[in-house]
Image (spheres, helix red, strand yellow):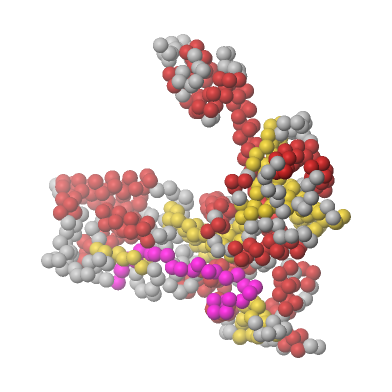
Amino acid sequence: MNSLAQKIDSLAAQPGVYLFKDEEGELLYVGKAANLKHRVNSYFQKPAGKDLKTLAMLEKVADIDTILTQTEKEALILEDNLIKVHHPRYNVKLRDDKNYPLLRLSLEDEFPTLSIVRRVQKDRSLYFGPFPSATSLRETLKLIQRLFPIRTSLDTKFTPRLRSCREEDVERGLCPEVNDPVQYREVVRQVRMFLAGKNEDLIENLMKKMTEESERLNFEAAAGIRDQIGHIQQIIERQKIVSRDSVDQDVVGFCPRGPAVVIYLLIVRGGKILGGRGFAFPPAELPDEEIIGSFLRQYYRVGKFIPRQILIPRTIADRAVLEQWLTELRGERVRIIIPAKGEKKELLKMAEENAEKFPLSKIDTEEERSKLLESLRENLSLARIPRRIEAFDISNLMGGNAVGSLVCFEDGLPAKERYRHFKIKTVAGADDYAMMGEVLLRRYQKALAGDHLPDLVLLDGGRGQLNVAQEVFKKLHIQGVELISLAKERMVEGPGREKTEEKIFHPRYPEPFILEKHSPVRNLLDYIRDEAHRFAITYHKKVRSRGTIRSRLGEIRGIGAVRQRRLLESYGSVEKIRAAAAEELLRVPGMSRRAAQAVYQFFHPPEKNKPQITSIK
């Protein structure tokens, strides 16, 4: 038995942190465990089930250190601290963990104030936020000052002589005596309700107060409260409510995106979205659950605002201990929820859509993208690093309105100015191979005439699409451009169990490549293929919609192909044509009075026994 195996065998069966090191003592990975012996042993047993990155890491492990802790929660905190200090190569690292601004209401003071802070203290104050920017928070603070006569931290002294009520507050009956804590506490209560999103309760409370002032014949005070209610109602109308649950929530959207893994945190407070933050990590061959768990452990910490609910897309191994730790940090129960349906599921979908669209170009991942492209070259045995990749997809419905798409990626990022659409012209019926051949021929005839050829061409499909591409390249005498096709295949593993595999076909190899599920190379190829598919589907829907509109317009007597085209160019959609008045339709180039009237009457047939009153004079 070698020294490493002996060390593993002698590990304690209790909570702690393990540190994997290479021969030179460099730290490779830090992990935590409820049972160190069991967890570390699991790495070195059954290697067939491990992902590529884990196997690559284990090959480098020459030594293991451990640090014992009393509880799994202590191990979780220690793991986070060690990752931040040592930046191990194989751990996910959160780079942008700055604190965003919060609004603090100092309830411990006799006359509470509102102030802008960036850390949560363990005091009796209430904290609201975080806000996406200091600008948005300052605007909120100004709004509150306009609605409620509450002090802010700008008031360095607070005496009747130095802090008299504003004249407009007195006129509106909204200014309590500055030396009357009871009246001031009522204002504070209203501010708390407003910031917590309990606007309906606040309005009900103010309506009751307005009635009381009216009954006392304090009509000026009642009018001031009436105006305050009106302002709050205007604000409510402008705010989009996304959840009837007024509990503060952070919603974690997760999306592997080729050169990066993106997490988008949607910030929901009082049922309304305050904003969001995106985080991009270098590609990691770790399970999605581990990346999400590592993000949560690093993002939430002492001084950070912690909401009562955190919505995540899938379960994580240390969910219970993480909930316990966050509950202690917040001082009240925190729940980590995996929504299955309803409003919470819709919020999660919104966060994931933001993760999908988060602009990677703003993230400093140039070095990581270079490594990823080099890994792509090695994994697929390509002749050179594919700096420029072009991908194609075909979209058709039973051969109707068939279109093709081309998307281009340069250095691992979308080059959208090079995206192209193709409307199939020469193929009748649902023949995907022939359609792909037409698109490739049209694209690379033009490329040979002056445009640059890519390093790699990616096709959505299997060996058949690849054969078509080879024939096109042979016909055009194109050499030096690599060809691959990507096909998704479902495999039945047992009763009720399916496994999806991505197969990559290459002209030089009879058998397809199969990449691991969490491989960054696979994520990149999936991302490029999915982008080509999305671009094709979008165009196909547009073409199909235009065809439907044009066919409806063709039913109108006197509206031929030219007038149909000009109507669509002028209005863009059939709904806008339907909504146009007859006089407006007459302004379309080439429309006569009779034609405009015919279009209007087609969409607005006169009702029986009702005289027609719309006409062009």
Q: Nearer the viewer, residue 147 or 328?
A: 147
**Rendered residue at 77%/39% (across/down):** 437
Q: Is residue 91 magenta?
A: yes
Q: Nearer the viewer, residue 94 or 387?
A: 387
Magenta range: 83-108
Q: In what quadrant of the picture does the N terminus appear? A: bottom right
Give the side of residue 177 with respect to residue 74, left or right. left
Q: Is residue 587 magenta?
A: no
Q: Quadrant of residue 110?
A: bottom left
**Rendered residue at 74%/72% (across/down):** 55
Give the side of residue 468 with respect to residue 136, left or right. right
**Rendered residue at 62%/27% (across/down):** 548
Q: Quadrant of residue 26?
A: bottom right
The picture places residue 541, in percent across and down from the top left corner, at 63, 36
**Rendered residue at 56%/20% (across/down):** 563
Asked whether the viewer can see residue 458, the reply is no
The picture places residue 136, in percent across and down from the top left corner, at 37, 56
